[in-house]
Amino acid sequence: MDHVNHNWTQSFILAGFTTTGTLQPLAFLGTLCIYLLSLAGNILIIVLVQLDSGLFTPMYFFISVLSFVEVWYVSTTVPTLLHTLLHGCSPISPAVCFIQLYVFHSLGMTECYLLGVMALDRYLAICFPLHYHALMSRQVQLRLAGATWVAGFSAALVPVTLTATLPFCLKEVAHYFCDLAPLMRLACVDTSWHTRAHGAVIGVATGCNFVLILGLYGGILNAVLKLPSAASRAKAFSTCSSHMTVVALFYASAFTVYVGSPGSRSEGTDRLIALVYALFTPFLNPIIYSLRNKEVKEALRRKIGLDLGRD
């Protein structure tokens, strides 16, 4: 690998994925299509929740906030992925690299906390239905949503600051965007302490939130099993199944990369796993929340029917 001096005049190099021949344009076009569909799907959910009165509920408010996060989350890394697929190894300035690192992890932590808030919303709706609207008022919704952003952008400061202050002797980042482990491999010093600190901060933040989600869904399961009719139980489970699917996708990939030991995986493995949570999860979320959700499909039909009627 090439060396970089410490006065920050040179750029890092994003290695990206190695693609040749006919595979290169196919990989580029496939990624571009997934990116555009991710943007379209998430923006569609945001617009539907804002325009359709049938979706003016706390659950859909938080889903729209999640979609808003996903729009920015996927846009933080996919442009550099597309650039490396099209042009190969791509230079990136240290300032842009660390901004990308901070924004990516801030949005990721925000999504982590938001998934916990969404689980709390479902818990209150199912376990305390008579008091649900009082407990989850519009003001409470806005405060909870704002708290996830503040907590996410605050929690990301520690690992990003520790990484940005390292002295770097190498400049080729074995990834398609600036991430913690690939950057630490470029440092001139031993980063074992930094790795433990990153694992502790991210592990505690995500781990505690994951335990909270499991606890809330344990309470939901207990309440659902006590419902008198099978139809009531099926309806309650259906409102939670989409959220549980998203939680499983997000946490399985995130824990693998950021809580496990970086040394136990090859460099290419992190890039492949990153595609799951940085590209495919934002793409799948609108599909999960729309195709599996009767209210969203009905809202879409109403809006399409209304527009066709005006024409």
Image (spheres, rainbow, N blue to C red):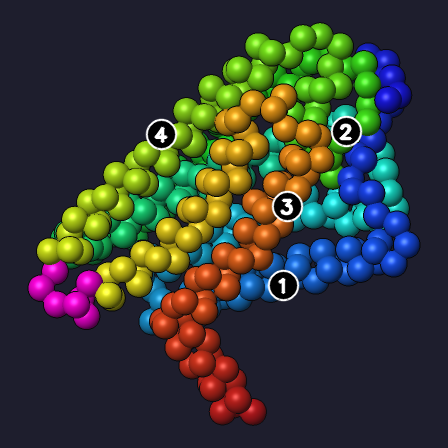
Q: Is residue 231 magenta?
A: yes
Residue 50 spot, x, y in % from top left: 44, 65
Examine the rendering and report whether any part of residue 159 can be seen: yes
Question: Where does label 4 land, which residue?
Answer: 208
Does label 2 or label 4 sit earlier along the sequence? 2
Which marked residue is nearer to the observer: mark 2 or mark 1? 2
SS class of the residue under badge 4? Answer: helix
Circle nearer the N terminus (3, 1): 1
Instruction: Compute the Cα span from label 4 to label 1.
Output: 32 Å
Q: Earlier in the sequence, mark 3 or mark 2?
A: 2
Of tags 3 and 1, the one toward the viewer is 3
Where, quadrant-wise, is the N terminus in this rendering? Answer: top right
Q: CA distance from mark 3 to mark 2?
A: 16 Å
Mark 4–mark 3 Cα distance, whole angstroms, equals 24 Å
Residue ID at (56%, 91%): 311
The disc placed on residue 275 is 3
Foreground tag (4 vs 3): 3
Which residue is identified by label 1? 37
Q: Tell me which amino acid carries mark 3.
A: Leu
Q: Which residues are magenta?
A: 227-233
Say above or below: 152 vs 233: above
Work out whether 238 lies above or below 19: below
Name the residue rendered at 83%, 56% in the picture.
23
Inspect the magenta stretch and tell me whether residue 246 lies in it: no
Horizontal placement of 105 versus 95: left or right?
left
Q: Is residue 196 above or below residue 128?
A: above
Within-10-Å neighbours for mark 3: few <14, some 14–19, many 20+: some
